[in-house]
Amino acid sequence: MSAAGAAPPAPPLEPVAFIGLGALGAPMAARLLQAGHPLTVHNRNRERELPLAAAGARRAASVPQAVAGTAVLCLCLSDDRAVQAVLLEQALAALAPGALVIDFSTIAPATSRALASHLEVAGITYLDAPVTGGTEGARAGTLAVLVGGSGAALERARPLLEAVGSSISHFGPVGAGQQAKAVNQVLVAGSYAAVAEAIALGHRLGLPMAQVCAALEGGAAGSWALRHRAANMLSDHFPLGFRLALHRKDLAIALAEAAAAGLELPLTTQVAAMEDTLIAGGHADEDVSVLARWFEAGH
């Protein structure tokens, strides 16, 4: 401590590479940058790097260039295949022993466990840390982060996780975070579908549904989906928060986990079938709230 009684300066933040700047990844990377982390970014669509570069991030022309010399690699990618390709085929050779991989993607728990085992051989630590809270939470830094991995890895990652989330929950070894995310997506499926179904009923009854939804938000029927997505359903306008195709992918993970555990999920199975119909009708890239369109189609 100095003569003035000041505390010693905090250690410098570890350099971070962030791969995957989609609807969630871009605002999450921005939160890391705002928190002072030295940040390098790369995205397959290079234009998505530009706003972060304007805010002070370094752009990298490739995944290996992004991760070279970095201490922490963050991923926020669309599916298992994308994570495996980026991590094993492009990043691994450029990562140094002692590096930490934080995977914010939503993938199968078995894939996370396999990746962790593969990286461990190279002296690299892996955390699965899928998130929930939508694009609103990503922009505000209030995501819920669902973590699987060692306690030591979590503590190392904590400064980064606290920059993107207001709730950090550790569920056990690698894969446990993905299992918790599967439970989350089952709840999302039911809540979005319930809001869509309730709105369809209200319309058929001739009720002023904007007023009805506002009245119900504070009661027993209140939910995140009702509060944040009912207006989109009522206006038949579905600005992207989370793509329907990605949610359907997540439901496939949840249904597979349930089947392996000997459990049937009838509500989730029904919502998955509804989503399949909408995807076949060309709605794959719209927000999950497009579930309201299923009822408009006369089902």
Image (spheres, rainbow, N blue to C red):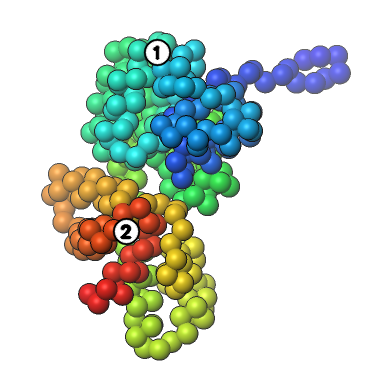
Q: Is residue 205 above or below residue 104?
A: below
Q: Is residue 125 above or below residue 182?
A: above
Quadrant of the snapshot with the N terminus: top right
Q: Residue at x 31, y 16 (%)?
A: 120
> Is there any visible trace of residue 268 in the rendered image?
no
Q: Residue at x 31, y 33 (%)?
A: 82
Q: Is residue 66 above or below residue 96?
A: below
Q: Secondary structure at mark 1?
A: helix
Q: Toward which corner of the image does residue 147 lie, by quadrant? A: top left
Disc 1 marks which amino acid? Answer: Ala
Q: Position of residue 139 (x, y in %)?
A: 56, 46
Mark 2 lies on residue: 283
Q: Is residue 94 above or below residue 278?
A: above
Q: CA distance from mark 1 to mark 2?
A: 38 Å
The answer to whether 14 appears left or right of 80 in the picture is right
Q: Position of residue 255 (x, y in %)?
A: 20, 50
- Give whichever of discs 1 and 2 has the lower sequence position: 1
Q: Secondary structure at mark 2?
A: loop
Q: Which of 22 and 267 lies nearest the eye of the viewer? A: 22
Q: Which mark is residue 200?
A: none
* Crowding near the residue tagged with mark 2, few <14, some 14–19, many ≥20 C-alpha atoms within 10 Å: some
Q: Residue furthest bottom?
A: 206
> Is there any visible trace of residue 243 in the rendered image?
yes
Q: Residue at x 22, y 48 (%)?
A: 252
Q: Which of 40 and 183 lies nearest the eye of the viewer? A: 40
Total labels: the figure holds 2
Mark 1 lies on residue: 94
**Labels 1 & 2 near each other (Cβ < 8 A):** no
